[in-house]
């Protein structure tokens, strides 16, 4: 037994991992599905550092966010006494890079995606880790509501490709910053009048970020909120039209969505469109992915006054919400060597198959025949290719179809050509 354990709130991905997000083959499935969709929607990859100046994250998330209030940031001082932090989310780094590299001067929108780890120092629960992985997209440099439709449909498409069950996208419009500035004091005043009926968390949030009280699961708080003023009635004509166009687009694409005028998001930068994709197959942590529009953020970070919208979706939760699936192992050929002299020829043939894209493996233990066949079985190989003294003498291999048990003899004296044909079927 080792004395060492992975840090609290983290997990490993390893062969035979128990939870879906611990299984390497499922990660490949998710990442490939996402990359394929990003290409089809014309998004380019962006890779930014996993740490940045802490003030970038604090500034973007805002005073009232969980990241600041709940101290979720993994921050540290570097040797130059600079306050740095592991990124809690993908948007700030992407927007910082967009400004730093003058991407706003190119034809807009700039459509970006990322896949990578995010860090939040929070209490570990099911579906909540201190290091998790997000797949995210950002469409920068436009306010067009049809881009909102594209971003939401891309999020939905990724979830569907991975197999997320019972998904509904909840949609709201928070208006512009002025709308929120007009609405928030009204909401706060209303909550203050009912503070005796609220849970303690919501009382605290009433001061810092009253919008977040909508996230409370407390019955009394929800009863108070049911009668609270709604942002919907504060929306400008512009915001109402924006929402109507987004709805029209989602309907045209057949994306299951519902309006939720109590939907607020944890980050202060959101304006106009906000959305959350939920799966009823998850328990308490039922949001698989979420995002929204941030029309003030680019200028707030020193760039031009352009809008943007993005989403982030958690791979761990995506896999939890997906129908459990048996992913067959993708090994094509396992070489069974029955004599020491067969090992080098097997290495050579395996090399030739691998060059042709045929996944191959062989015995490295010098094990007996039965153990090797067992291993061939365990690896899920489609074919066992047998090389014994007899085969060596005749310049052939015996190819066994592992599912039917049928065997055939294939010449290899002149190279692997016939073997490649035999196992490509
Ligand atoms: P929550 O309300 O659950 O704390 P959030 O608002 O903090 O969520 P976002 O910042 O919108 O979440 O992150 C986008 C997605 O990233 C979430 O929907 C979720 O799938 C995933 N995610 C966020 N935090 C964690 C975490 N600690 N562990 C695992 N996944 C996470
Ligand atoms: Mg959170």
Image (tube, rainbow, N blue to C red):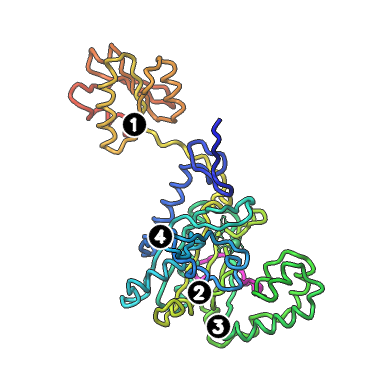
Mark 2 or mark 1: name the one nearer the start of the chain: 2
Question: Which image quadrant for residue 198?
Answer: bottom right
x 47%, y 70%: residue: 56
Determine if the magenta segment contains residue 329: no
x 51%, y 43%: residue: 12
Does 140 sit above or below residue 340?
below
Label 1 to label 3: alpha-carbon separation: 58 Å
For mark 4, what is the residue?
Answer: 49
Question: Which dot, 2 or 3, sits closer to the camera?
Answer: 3
Does 115 sit above or below residue 142?
above
For mark 1, what is the residue?
Answer: 360
Instruction: Say few, some or many: other residues with alpha carbon within 10 Å of mark 4 (under 14 / 14 to 19 / 20 or more).
Output: few
Residue at the outermost bottom position: 237
Q: Secondary structure at mark 2?
A: strand
For mark 3, what is the residue?
Answer: 177
In contact (CB < 8 Å): disc 4 and disc 3: no
Label 2 to label 1: alpha-carbon separation: 47 Å
In contact (CB < 8 Å): disc 1 and disc 3: no
Q: Secondary structure at mark 3?
A: helix
| Chain part drawn in magenta | 250-265
Q: Looking at this view, is 105 or 65 the one in front?
A: 65
Label 2 to label 3: alpha-carbon separation: 11 Å
Which quarter of the image is occupied by the N terminus?
Answer: top right
One can see residue 247 in this view = no
x 26%, y 31%: residue: 351
Question: Which dot, 4 or 2, sits closer to the camera?
Answer: 4
Residue at the outermost left position: 414
For mark 2, what is the residue?
Answer: 293
Question: Which dot, 1 or 3, sits closer to the camera?
Answer: 3
Mark 4 or mark 3: name the one nearer the start of the chain: 4
Mark 1 or mark 3: name the one nearer the start of the chain: 3
């Amino acid at each position: 037994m080792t004395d060492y354990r992975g840090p609290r709130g983290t997990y490993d991905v390893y062969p035979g991992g128990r939870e879906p997000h611990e299984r390497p083959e499922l990660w490949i499935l998710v990442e490939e599905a996402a990359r394929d969709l990003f290409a089809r929607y014309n998004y380019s990859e962006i890779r930014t550092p996993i740490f940045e100046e802490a003030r970038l994250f604090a500034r973007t998330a805002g005073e009232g966010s969980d990241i600041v209030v709940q101290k979720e940031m993994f921050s540290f001082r570097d040797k130059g006494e600079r306050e740095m932090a592991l990124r809690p989310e993908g948007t700030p780094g992407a927007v910082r890079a967009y400004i730093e590299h003058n991407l706003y001067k190119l034809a807009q929108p700039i459509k970006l995606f990322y896949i990578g780890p995010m860090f939040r120092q929070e209490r570990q629960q099911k579906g909540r880790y201190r290091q998790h992985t997000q797949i995210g997209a950002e469409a920068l440099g436009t306010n067009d509501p049809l881009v909102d439709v594209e971003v939401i449909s891309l999020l939905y498409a990724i979830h569907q490709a991975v197999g997320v069950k019972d998904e509904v996208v909840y949609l709201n419009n928070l208006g512009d910053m002025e709308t929120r500035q007009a609405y928030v004091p009204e909401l706060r005043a209303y909550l203050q009048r009912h503070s005796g009926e609220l849970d303690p968390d919501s009382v605290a949030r009433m001061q810092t970020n009253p919008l977040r009280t909508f996230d409370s699961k407390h019955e009394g708080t929800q009863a108070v909120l049911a009668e609270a003023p709604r942002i919907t009635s504060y929306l400008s004509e512009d915001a109402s039209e924006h929402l109507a166009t987004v709805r029209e687009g989602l309907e045209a694409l057949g994306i299951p969505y519902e309006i939720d005028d109590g939907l607020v998001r944890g980050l202060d930068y959101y304006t106009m469109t906000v959305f959350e994709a939920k799966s009823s197959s998850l328990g308490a942590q039922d949001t698989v992915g979420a995002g929204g529009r941030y029309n003030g953020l680019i200028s707030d970070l020193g760039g031009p006054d352009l809008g943007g919208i993005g989403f982030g979706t958690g791979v761990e939760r995506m896999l939890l919400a997906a129908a459990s699936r048996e992913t067959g192992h993708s090994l094509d050929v396992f070489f069974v060597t029955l004599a020491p002299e067969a090992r080098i020829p097997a290495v050579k043939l395996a090399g030739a198959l691998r060059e042709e894209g045929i996944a191959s493996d062989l015995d490295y233990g010098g094990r007996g025949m039965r153990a090797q066949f067992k291993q061939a079985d365990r690896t899920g190989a489609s074919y066992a290719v047998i090389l014994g003294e007899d085969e060596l003498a005749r310049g052939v291999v015996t190819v066994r179809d592992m599912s039917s048990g049928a065997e055939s003899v294939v010449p290899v004296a002149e190279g692997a050509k016939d073997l490649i044909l035999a196992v490509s079927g």
